[in-house]
Amino acid sequence: MSQLILTLDDDLVQAAREYTRQRGQNLEALVAQFLQATLRPIVAAQPAAEPSIPLSPRIQRLFGAVQVPADFDYRQALDEAMQERFGA
């Protein structure tokens, strides 16, 4: 595991520490979760690696259940479905 040193405003660090204390986490975990959530679209575009947390057998059975074209745009499909259901 690598170490990263950040320089942040003291008030921001204090607020973040209080936030994590109230939720029973530590600040390092919060920063890691934020980076993972932020970088997920970038990482998703790269070849898939083995997940660090094993997926449940129920989730693993879903792989390959749906076949879509390589150029499938889920955002467009979602927009069309939302417009069809709720109108524009």
Image (spheres, helix red, strand yellow):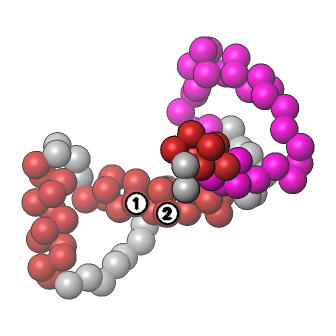
The reply to whether residue 44 is visible in this rendering is no
Picture disc at residue 38: 2
Disc 1: which residue: 34
Name which residue lies at 40% across and 54% down: 33
Place of residue 48 in the rendered image (x, y in percent of width and height, measured from the top left): 74, 46
Q: Name the dominant secondary structure of the magenta segment.
A: loop
| Circle 2: element type | helix
Q: Is residue 48 left or right of residue 42?
A: right
59 up-or-down from 22: above or below: above
The reply to whether residue 28 is visible in this rendering is yes
Q: Which residues are magenta?
A: 51-79
| Circle 1: element type | helix
Place of residue 21 in the rendered image (x, y in percent of width and height, measured from the top left): 12, 51
Residue 35 lies in magenta, yes or no?
A: no
Q: Amino acid at mark 2?
A: Thr
Q: Amino acid at mark 1?
A: Phe
